[in-house]
Image: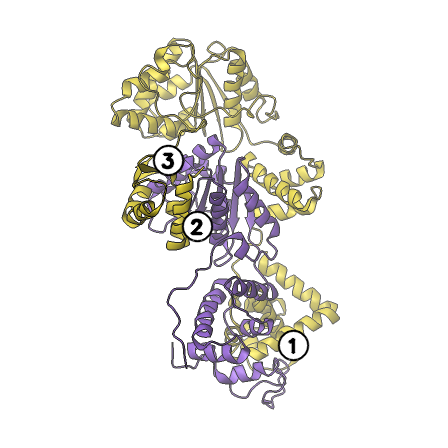
Chain colours: A yellow, B purple
């Protein structure tokens, strides 16, 4: 929480600075009172630089005039310690100090407790991978080592991998399990090299009971990381510690990965996760909704699943959207909610609507030429489509009425106004016009 | 006698209170909730230019910040380097505007991926915006594309003319100006109708009204539009007499010409450009 003195500064800075600058550079600062200075923790050096250059003197001035007794602000990169923050590489001896008392997730990210085998929806597309993962979770280091899970993005590899980690911890709460994304492994290693803590880095990784490493395709082309990972991998396997890897393709197909790594990845068991079939997709949706205590009718689940076939994450996105609508309106989830969510996700209305496009579409619809729409001709077969096109241009674009008039052969803005009113009346009185207008709207907006 | 207005005017604040929701009520509700509830959430807003994306994202950051949360708003591609994402996974709410401006850039995509993962692991909230839904963006990193597709995706619904008029009147009230409905209707029939364009025009009208110490009546607004080169006297005189009620008849019988259209219309003829 911001300190009172920093709150007072914020109020003043908000008035001083353009709002966007305030939201970009000042909002992410965290204040810590460390009398006589106010430490301002910034996420990165860009924020530090910007604030130093643009408003540090103003902040100091505000502090001087404040009664809190702080004399100056000190900017630094950092963050107040929070329980969930990912720790950097453990300090010397922390992870390597022995099994007892060492937090199980000192390396990498926290395991998501929701990712368990119980919440993993099994189908034909993933049953082999699930069965193998389950065995590994029960007997880490013994069943299949390494376990290599591959498949396209968003199919549940990470869920499966973290379920294994959670299962290992359920069997032995003291087990040291690390879930690390490959990018993070590379980043941590680079930092360890920079800070001369590579030995600690090695020791931390090699003391694990289970290493879960996600998306190893990110190692491609990074030779130094591959080298380090190769040794870590060997050390763990020799010590009968479990290694689980995921990748977006079969190991042999990853370009830029050393042959010796590829071949070692194949020592254990390699299993594929395929895109879910329709029934599995629907079941996944219903299971995710149930986890949020939301009632998702089967017909809605199938409706969404039918339209999003490739990827579980997209299903999740559509579901979140449907649930948000239902929560806001307080109404049960309906097919209409699902339709709206899919329209937004799949951009079914995403067409660039321009006046030219409207003219072309209207001319085609009424089987006349665009030149007729722009001409001075006044017979009804032309004026009616022209009026409809003008009304559509007003509804679907932000052009001013004079601009729309201009685009229709240099007509006046009152002509456009008249056309819009006329079309409005006709749509109310003549079903044919109403139908034409709706059809054109549909064509133009997808 | 004309009073010189001060150059400093209160800026329009990008907060929820100054956003006219139109058909976007449930989206605004979802955003407010995201700003205030400490639970992992992932949202994606898309819409054309001027739809209100930046406004909504900043409103979200503002609300979260005011409630004591650490939040940041980053307009991507605005000469900011990808390094600006470093450490941003430690905020409670991160709003990334204009993702499409960095899509396809390998450094940015790697940075976004790492930030996404960091936020996800901490259960923090991420709200993004672009001109398109995530699936339509030319992202090169499939892992990033698939993760972003898990966002609850909302299209910002464009406002119709009536809602635009209401939004303009609300914005005027927000600035302590009174914009009568007949004046906003007058404006909508004459100028470019995108909301940013209308709000910019409101700036000008605000200044002019302050300088002249006048209210925003149709004759005064017409005068300002003429001065700005946005309107000719003739067009204004026809329209101001009651939406084409008693102008000079053109004598034409063109079925798509209103009976009261002027004979000669000079638009944008002012010497000021």
Contact, CB < 8 Å: mark 2 with mark 3? no
Q: Is residue A415 above or below residue A253?
A: below
Residue B98, disc = 2
Q: What is the C-alpha distance between the residues marked 2 and 3? A: 32 Å
Q: Which residue is mark 3?
A: A32
Q: Which residue is mark 1?
A: A381
Contact, CB < 8 Å: mark 1 with mark 3? no
Q: Is residue A149 above or below residue B122?
A: above
- Looking at the rendered image, the disc whose residue lies closer to the viewer, 1 or 2, is 2
- Give whichever of discs 1 and 3 has the lower sequence position: 3
SS label for mark 1: helix
The C terminus of chain A, quarter of image: bottom right
Q: Could you say where residue B187 lies in the image, as x and y percent from the top left?
A: 53, 73
- Looking at the rendered image, the disc whose residue lies closer to the viewer, 2 or 3, is 3
Q: Could you say where residue B72 lies in the image, as x and y percent from the top left?
A: 42, 44
Residue under mark 3: which chain is it in? A
Q: Could you say where residue A211 lies in the image, as x and y percent from the top left?
A: 43, 18
| Residue A10 visible in the displayed image | yes
Q: What is the C-alpha distance between the residues marked 1 and 2? A: 45 Å
Q: Is residue A258 above or below residue A25?
A: above
């Amino acid at each position: 929480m911001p300190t009172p003195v920093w709150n007072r500064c914020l109020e003043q800075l908000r008035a001083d600075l353009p709002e966007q600058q305030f939201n970009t550079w000042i909002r992410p600062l965290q204040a810590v009172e460390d009398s006589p200075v106010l430490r301002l923790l910034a996420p990165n050096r860009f924020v530090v630089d910007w604030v130093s250059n643009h408003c540090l003197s103003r902040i100091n001035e505000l502090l001087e005039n404040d009664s809190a007794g702080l004399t100056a602000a000190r900017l630094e990169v950092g963050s107040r310690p929070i329980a969930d923050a990912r720790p950097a590489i453990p300090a010397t001896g922390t992870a390597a100090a022995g099994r007892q008392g060492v937090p199980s997730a000192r390396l990498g990210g926290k395991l998501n407790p929701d990712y368990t085998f119980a919440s993993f929806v099994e189908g034909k597309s993933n049953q082999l991978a699930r069965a193998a993962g389950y065995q590994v979770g029960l007997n880490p280091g013994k069943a299949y080592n390494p376990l290599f899970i591959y498949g396209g993005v968003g199919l549940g590899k990470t869920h499966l991998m973290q379920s294994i980690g959670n299962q290992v911890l359920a069997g032995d709460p003291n087990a040291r399990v690390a879930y690390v994304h490959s990018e993070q492994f590379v980043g941590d290693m680079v930092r360890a090299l920079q800070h001369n803590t590579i030995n600690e880095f090695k020791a931390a990784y090699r003391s694990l009971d289970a290493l879960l490493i996600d998306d190893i395709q990110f190692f491609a082309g990074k030779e130094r990381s591959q080298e380090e990972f190769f040794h870590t991998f060997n050390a763990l396997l020799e010590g009968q510690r479990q290694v689980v890897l995921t990748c977006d393709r079969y190991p042999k197909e990853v370009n830029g990965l050393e042959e010796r790594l590829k071949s070692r990845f194949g020592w254990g068991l390699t299993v594929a996760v395929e895109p879910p079939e329709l029934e599995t997709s629907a079941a996944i949706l219903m299971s995710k909704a149930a986890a949020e205590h939301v009632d998702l009718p089967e017909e809605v689940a199938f409706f969404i699943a039918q339209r999003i076939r490739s990827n579980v994450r997209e299903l999740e996105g559509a579901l979140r959207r449907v649930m948000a609508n239902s929560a806001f309106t307080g109404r049960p989830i309906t097919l209409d909610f699902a339709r709206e969510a899919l329209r937004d996700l799949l951009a079914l209305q995403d067409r660039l609507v321009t006046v030219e496009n409207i003219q072309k579409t209207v001319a085609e619809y009424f089987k006349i030429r665009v030149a007729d729409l722009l001409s001075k001709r006044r017979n009804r077969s032309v004026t009616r489509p022209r009026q409809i096109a003008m009304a559509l241009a007003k509804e679907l674009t932000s052009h001013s009425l004079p601009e729309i008039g201009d685009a229709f052969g240099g007509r006046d803005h009152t002509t456009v106004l008249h056309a819009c009113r006329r079309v409005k009346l006709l749509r109310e009185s003549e079903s044919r016009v109403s139908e034409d207008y709706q059809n054109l709207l549909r064509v133009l907006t997808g | 006698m004309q009073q010189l207005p001060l150059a400093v005017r209160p800026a329009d604040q990008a907060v929820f209170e100054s956003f006219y929701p139109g058909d976007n009520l449930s989206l605004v509700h979802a955003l407010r909730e995201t700003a205030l509830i400490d639970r992992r959430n992932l949202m994606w807003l898309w819409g054309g230019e001027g739809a209100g994306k930046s406004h909504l994202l900043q409103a979200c950051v503002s609300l979260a910040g005011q409630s004591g949360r650490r939040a940041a708003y980053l307009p991507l591609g605005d000469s900011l380097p990808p390094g600006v994402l470093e450490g941003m996974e430690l905020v409670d709410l991160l709003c990334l505007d204009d993702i499409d401006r960095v899509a396809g850039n390998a450094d940015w995509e790697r940075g976004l991926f790492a930030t996404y993962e960091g936020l996800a692991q901490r259960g923090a909230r991420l709200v993004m915006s672009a001109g398109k839904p995530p699936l339509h963006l030319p992202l090169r990193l499939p892992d990033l594309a698939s993760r972003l597709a898990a966002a609850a995706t909302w299209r910002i619904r464009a406002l119709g003319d009536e809602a635009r008029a209401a939004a303009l009147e609300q914005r005027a009230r927000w600035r302590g100006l009174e914009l009568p409905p007949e004046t906003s209707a007058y404006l909508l029939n004459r100028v470019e109708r995108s909301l940013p364009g209308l709000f910019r025009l409101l700036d000008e009208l605000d200044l002019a009204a302050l300088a002249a110490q006048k209210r925003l009546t149709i004759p005064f607004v017409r005068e300002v539009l003429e001065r700005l080169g946005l309107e000719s006297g003739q067009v204004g005189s026809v329209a101001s007499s009651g939406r084409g009620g008693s102008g000079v008849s053109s004598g034409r019988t063109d079925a798509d010409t209103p009976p009261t259209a002027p004979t000669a219309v000079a638009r944008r003829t002012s010497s000021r450009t």
